[in-house]
Image (spheres, rainbow, N blue to C red):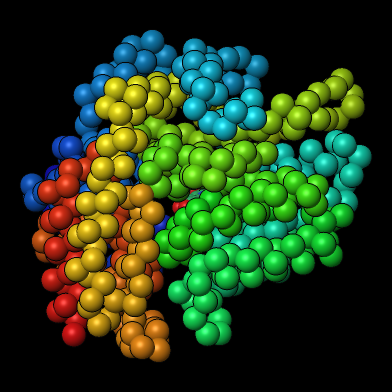
Amino acid sequence: MTTAQLQDLDRRHLWHPFTPMKLWAGEAPLVITDAQGMYLIDSDGNRYLDGVSSLWCNVHGHRVPEIDAAIRAQLDRVAHSTLLGLSNEPAIVLADRLMKVVPQNLKKVFYSDSGATATEVSFKLAAQYWFNLGKPEKREFISFTEAYHGDTFGAMSVGRTDLFHRAYLPMLFKVHSAPTPFPYRWPGTERTDAEVCAAALKALEKILYEHSAGIAAVCIEPVVQGAAGMIVHPAGFLRGVRDLATRYNVLLICDEVAVGFGRTGRLFACEHEQVQPDLLCLAKGITGGYLPLAATLATQDIFDAFLGEPSEGRTFYHGHTYTGNPLACAAALASLDLFERNDLIAQVGLKVQALSNMLESLAELPNVGNIRQKGLMVGIELVADRATKRRYDPLRRIGVEVCQRVRQHGIILRPLGDVIVLMPPLAMGVDELQRIVEAVMIEIERLM
Ligand code: PLP
C-alpha cells in the first residue's frame, strides 16, 4: 500500500492510545513499516533513531537475529497454549531463569501480558493475601503523587492523574497519596536531596502511623518515577520506604514495568538500594521489547497464603488468555541470554557517564529548568522562566513541538508534557546518543 493509502485508512479506522484524535485527523501520521537495529523505517523508506525504545520497551534494538531466531524456533513448535490447567516449556524455563536474576526473596512468577495487568495482579494479590490471612480490613493502598501504574481500574486508582482520570474518579477505590520526593519542585524554599528524602519519608510514615491497620500495600516505581516526568528519587528513599513498609506491616509493591531490565543501570532498580519487594511487577523490557508479556513476582509467604482446599476459597481466581504465551517467553529468554552474552549492564554503565557529559551542554540553556538522569532514563524539563521555574502555558504543547522538530533530524522522541524524554534502547551506541542530544539541543535553542 502507498503511504497515502495507509494514512487514509489509519484516519478512517484507528483510534490511537493517549491521542487527541481531533488533532490526529489533521496530521499526516508516520507509518512504520520496517526496522533495523536502532532505526525505525517509515512507509517512504525514511529512517528514524528510536530515541524512546518504542515506548520504553526495546532493549537490544530491532530485528535482533538471536531474538528473531528464538521466536521462529518457538513458532515451529507451538505459538500459544494456555497456562490454565496446562503448562508450557518456555513459561517454565523463563520462570526459573527469572528466579536467578530477581531479588532472592521472590519465589513465584504470575504471568500476564502488559504493565497494567502486572500491577493489577499485584494489587489483587496484596488485597487477597490479607483477606486470606483473616485481615480483610487491610485493603487500601498507598501510592506516590503522580504515580502511573497503567490504565485498568485498579491501576488508575493507585496511579491517579486528574487530567486522565477525571471521568472515572468516583469509580476508583480509596488510595492514600504520599508525596513524591521531587527535589526540583518540592514546595517552599530550595532543599537538598537528603532533606526532601527525609520530608517525604516522614509524610509516608504519618500515613502509615494513622492508617496501617487498613492498608494492604505501598506501591512505588523504584528510583525513577517515569510517567510523572522522569523524576529521580533521592538516594535512600526506596530503602526508607522498604523499612517503613516492614515496620508498619504492609506489603511493598515495586512497579519495575518501566525501570526494570537495565534502564537505570542495574538489571532491576531495586538493586540500587538492595531492596527486596514483596511483589515485583515486570513488563515492557522483559521480552527485549518484542512481544507483550508481563510478570508479577511474589514471595513464598504470599504464595503460601493462597494454599488450601478449593472449598476454602483461597485460590487466586485471575488469569488472561495469553498468560505465559510461549512465543513471548521464548523472546524473553533470548533477551536474557543477550544481557549475559553482551555484558549489557556493564556496557550501559559505560554509556551512562558519556550521556551525562553530553547533557551538560543542555543544562546551560535558559529554558531548560532541570535535567534528570538515572542510567539511560533522561528527562529534560523545559520552563518558561528558569529563575522562577514557571511552566510554559500547557496550550503551547512545548514538549510536542520540540519532539516534532526533532523528528526532522531523523529521531523519534515522545515527551511527557514539558519534559523531553530520552530513553534509548540499552544497546544504542554513544555516537547515536550524541546525535539525539545534539538534535534536542538545536531544537530547544530554536525555541528562544
Ligand atoms: N507501570 C509503569 C511504571 C509504567 O511506566 C507503565 C507504562 O508506561 C505501566 C505500568 C503500564 O504498562 P502498559 O502500558 O504495558 O500497560
- Rendered image quadrant of residue 429: top left
**Residue pushed farthest left?**
45
Q: Is residue 307 left or right of residue 393?
A: right
Q: Could you tell me which residue is drawn at 69 percent across and 53 percent down? A: 218
Q: Could you tell me which residue is drawn at 31 percent across and 42 percent down? A: 349
In this view, 338 is above or below 392? above
Q: Is residue 371 left or right of residue 403?
A: right
In this view, 445 is above or below 356? below
Q: Could you tell me which residue is drawn at 45 percent across and 47 percent down? A: 259
Q: Does the rendering let one see residue 269?
A: yes
Residue 86: x %, y % from top left: 60, 14
Residues 100 and 399: in front is: 100
Q: Quadrant of the N terminus?
A: top left
Q: Quadrant of the C terminus?
A: bottom left
Q: Does the rendering let one see residue 55?
A: no
Residues 438 and 314: in front is: 438
Q: Could you tell me which residue is drawn at 88 percent across and 51 percent down? A: 137
Residue 50: x %, y % from top left: 23, 49
Residue 434: x %, y % from top left: 15, 55
Residue 249: x %, y % from top left: 80, 47
Q: Is residue 117 left or right of residue 39?
A: right
